[in-house]
Amino acid sequence: MPEAASTRAVIGDSEFDRDTAVTRRVPGVYDIDLSAGWTIINAVNGGYLLAVLGRALADTLPHPDPFTISAHYLTASQPGPAVIRTDTVRTGRTLSTGQASLFQYDDDGNEVERIRVLASYGDLAALPDDVRTTATPPAIPPMDQCFGPETASDIRLPSGGPAPVDGSSAITERLMLKLDPATLGWALGAPSGKGEMRSWFGLADGRDTDPLALLLAVDALPPTAFEIGLKGWVPTVELTVHVRHRPAPGPLRVSVATRNLAGGFLEEDAEVWDSADRLVAQSRQLARVRLG
């Protein structure tokens, strides 16, 4: 369970750090016990898995920070033991590239690959300060005017709107999410149809975010499919994250949007902004939806 708010966690000593920690067996091979605390519906959250693999690659490669990481989710990961295998593809002065795969065993004892990533790492602290952008932070009401997951559950009751998914929601206990009311129509049984989700984001134990936690942040909000009027699990097929800056202390603002659903697949484009109004991460994922 998350640490009490009065004992604010710090980077390097938090539940997120412990649950993403990998143990090097030999160079390029790591063991981890995937925590059930980061599950949603019936599987381990994809952003948490990306952070786990990101930590293994940070140990493998000579550079500290993920700049870009692309993941293909092959089979659903389950809480419990897993093995990560990494390879260094190339090392250079400013960037290094590596790949990693996470494996578990099925009920018959066969090794199954769950997720495979290709990533380039560098040093975010060494980047120049020059920023030229037309992007602007999302307009989200103050936190005291937004709703946490537990409140979203409450506001379903008077409207009679059904819960959109069944299964584990353990990950919500480890996150500080305050959802923009304008993107909560799904919780009232009246989705807007716009395919947008916006929220304040942090870790429940007060730990500030770092580049690895940004890999979690881009995949932590309820699916935009809910605001399109769909229900059920929306499994990620592929997810690419670009980390642009090391985030300043304080809560993040995350906005996610879907513009196209076709053939049972949709994209989710996410932006993550820090307390200094900097765009610190961007992502795009392709996800499968269940129609009908």
Image (cartoon, rainbow, N blue to C red):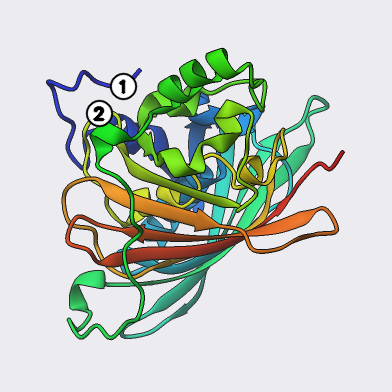
Q: Is residue 79 visible?
A: no
Label 1 crowd bin: few (<14), some (14–19), many (20+), radius 10 Å: some
* Residue type marked 1: Pro
At numbered mark 2, what does the secondary structure look like: helix, strand or loop?
loop
Label 2 crowd bin: few (<14), some (14–19), many (20+), radius 10 Å: many
Q: Nearer the viewer, residue 174 or 48?
A: 174
Give residue 157's quadrant in the image: top right
Image quarter of the C terminus: top right
- In the picture of the structure, the residue carrying the numbered disc 2 is 205
Q: Which mark is residue 2?
A: 1
Q: Is residue 35 left or right of residue 259?
A: left
Q: Which mark is residue 258?
A: none
Who's the residue at 50% across and 55% down the image?
A: 256
Q: Position of residue 172 (x, y in %)?
A: 44, 27
Q: Is residue 124 visible?
A: yes
Image quarter of the N terminus: top left
Give residue 103's quadrant in the image: top right
Q: Position of residue 9 (x, y in %)?
A: 18, 32
Q: Position of residue 11 (x, y in %)?
A: 21, 42
Please say if the residues under marks 2 and 1 sit with CB atoms less than 8 Å apart.
yes
Alpha carbons under labels 2 and 1: distance apart: 5 Å
Q: Nearer the viewer, residue 219 or 190?
A: 190
Q: Is residue 142 left or right of residue 81?
A: left
Who's the residue at 33% across and 56% down the image?
A: 139
Q: Relative to 46, does residue 155 appear above or below in the rendering?
A: above
* Count of marks overlaid on the render: 2
Q: Position of residue 107 (x, y in %)?
A: 79, 24
Who's the residue at 58% across and 19% down the image?
A: 159
Q: Is residue 213 left or right of residue 190?
A: left
Q: Relative to 189, does residue 210 appear above or below in the rendering?
A: below
Q: Nearer the viewer, residue 249 or 63?
A: 249
